[in-house]
Image (tube, grey):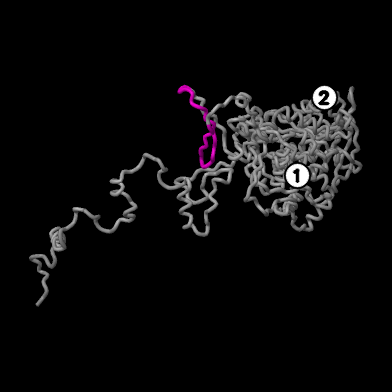
Amino acid sequence: MQVSQPYYQQIPQELVQKNREGGFVKKFYRSQVKYGAYVSPHHSSSDTNREEYLGRIVNEDDNVYYNKKWGFFRFTIKDSYTQLNNVYTLNSQGSQEFCSLCYGNIWLLHDLYHSTKFSSVLENLLPFEADTLHVLLAYKLTTGENTFVNVDSWFQRSYAQILYPHAAVSSGSISAFLKKLGENSIREKFFDIYHDYLKEDKESDVLICNNILIDSTGAQNDIKIPITRVSNHNGLVNNEFRVIYVVDHERNLPIYMNQVPGNVVDISTLKYIINLLIMRKIKVKCCVLDAGYYSDNNLEFLDQIDINYLVRMCNNRSLYKYLIEKESIDLNEETKYRILYRQRYLHCKKIVLNNDKRTHYAYIVLDFDKQTIDRNSIYAKYTKQEDISKKSLYMGKFILYSNYDIEESEVLNFYYTREHIEQVFDVAKNNGSMLPLRTHRMESTMGHLLLSFIATILSLQLNNRLKDTKYCATSALRIMNNLQVHVNNNNDDTTMSPLMPSEKELAIILNLNLDSPVKVDLSKEYTNEYLNKLKTKRNKGRPKGRNNRPFSFSNDTVNENIDDKNPLSNNENLNKSSLRRGRPKGSLNKVKKDNLTKFSLSNNPKRKRGRPKGSLNKPKSHNDKDNILLNNSKHKRGRPIGSKNKPKV
């Protein structure tokens, strides 16, 4: 399958059809890399466009060039420009004969894509960048990192380079990919394809969801984008925006995602999200909401569109206070309200509220464990008996409000399915690496959120396949990471490392076929994105040795006569090379012979001790030298004249 060039422009027809008579191709080095440029004949002194920059010389014999704008192309003076494919393969004499690649976790994800048929969603979303999307998702799920700094080195030692050979993993390519993924058209296209994937009846236009969960989480950041605002959520003040997830409880998968500014509270987002679901032809039968979405307007809106709901009532409502004071007096004493929930006994009382439009139901729940905690906090905060008696009526009690009848024994089990969306957020932040945000623009931020959303879907699908086992998605990927495949290029064969007991058990549970159908070819393959990283930095000073020679894709510039074991035999080869020390041949910047004989360091490599030859600062003889020392000294030898310190006779 040939992949088109997603990040490179087509060569303009003006340059392709340009008539070039005469001229030549100039070849030169920059930072030890060989480049080329076409030089046209000089017609006049005012001709400023005399040179056409071609780019890096990939294959000098085949006249293949590469630049960032047009990718790979072939240029000759006779035939002009000819654009090549995105991948240009070269035969390398020094290719690896043996290597080990991380195999187990990549093959597990590859099998997950095809067994769940989710690969069709990814391939239809971005047909030409599907390999890049597969690789970035695998990198997020297997490493848990939310930055793509090390994705290139991970890709080189992973089996992903064989499964997805056309992936663009350079830094610039990933940035461009995230910006493209964050476009509104791409996001809308993904949700259209994904909702068609979730439909049980493929011919139907409506996606039916029996029970959905809606909640939001804060994405703290200081990015200068329009949706970052100061948020006061549950008493915490941060710069953030809110990420809203809609989760289908029966499918155990998120079905929709959106974001709102940080200063928008949850109570004002419910109508917005429900209307978006209706526009996407998603039929919702029931939804479970937190207390942050409770308001009279929201509940009336759900009643009008005939959606059942179960929501926790806020404790600052007048209806809440009325029900607690009037209807919960006998709740603590009577045993007929006793229910069992998660091996704990609680009391629950159902109250029917008849309105003109529709009948509603309130469920007053008494939790004895919470009652003890509330009693301790009230005794620590209040000292007057009147205050304690008022507050003690509300200890350990909360109210669930619904527009359809539910049994008292099932209402808590149904409401606490809302915990599942908290687990989805936990998977999105850890396995999907949604937070912290490390982007700087709106488009790349939206692309990062969508990529984390897709990674969350894959992680939850793997958890669904591992249900009722002792493994989860994180542990399965960690265990399968130890499985490696050894590649032998000469025999065109692959050898897998021995399976551990946990790896065998996972392979049986997931029904994995660990035999790879892909034949390995380790011939050196350069992509447009990979060539951007091949530029080497020039070291300070003159280059030394064979490793710092001008780089070229052709083998003509490499000196094959260099002997590593006998460096002294390489002097003749080094003198013949283009990296000879000193001035090049033909240089007019030479030193005169007279100055060369006087000041050349090659004649006297080390200065001898004493005065140099010809110095006038020398004593004439040894006696003169002694006289000079005696005359210049302060005291002569012996005792000074007049000294009384004479030896006794």
Above or below — where is 641 with respect to 179?
below
Looking at the picture, tell me which residue is in the foreground, 608 or 285: 608
In this rendering, position of residue 579 left or right of residue 343:
left
Seen at 64% across and 31% down, the residue is: 82
Who comes first in sequence, dot 1 or dot 2? 2
Q: Residue placed farthest to the bottom in the image?
A: 649
Q: Residue placed farthest to the left in the image?
A: 642
**Is 33 inside the magenta-drawn segment?**
yes
Coordinates of residue 571 in the picture (x, y in percent):
46, 54
Q: Are marks 1 and 2 in contact (CB under 8 Å)?
A: no
Coordinates of residue 326 in the picture (x, y in percent):
85, 33
Coordinates of residue 536 in the picture (x, y in percent):
54, 43
Coordinates of residue 548 in the picture (x, y in percent):
51, 48
**Quadrant where the image shows the C terminus:** bottom left
Number of residues whose C-alpha sits closer than 10 Å to that of mark 2, classed few (under 14), some (14–19) or many (20 or more): some
Using the image, tell me which numbered label, if any, was put on residue 373: 1
- Mark 1 against mark 2, which lies toward the viewer? 2
In this rendering, position of residue 269 left or right of residue 61:
right
Q: How many marks?
A: 2
Looking at the picture, tell me which residue is in the foreground, 254 or 85: 85
Q: Is residue 234 visible?
A: no
Q: Amino acid at mark 2?
A: Phe
Q: Main secondary structure of the magenta part?
A: strand
* Dot 2: element: helix
Number of residues whose C-alpha sits closer than 10 Å to that of mark 1, classed few (under 14), some (14–19) or many (20 or more): few
Q: Which residues are magenta?
A: 24-46
Q: Amino acid at mark 1?
A: Ile
Above or below — where is 448 with respect to 626?
above
* Dot 1: element: helix
Looking at the picture, tell me which residue is in the foreground, 198 or 307: 198
Residue located beneath label 2 in the image: 301
* Cα distance between the residues tagged 1 and 2: 36 Å
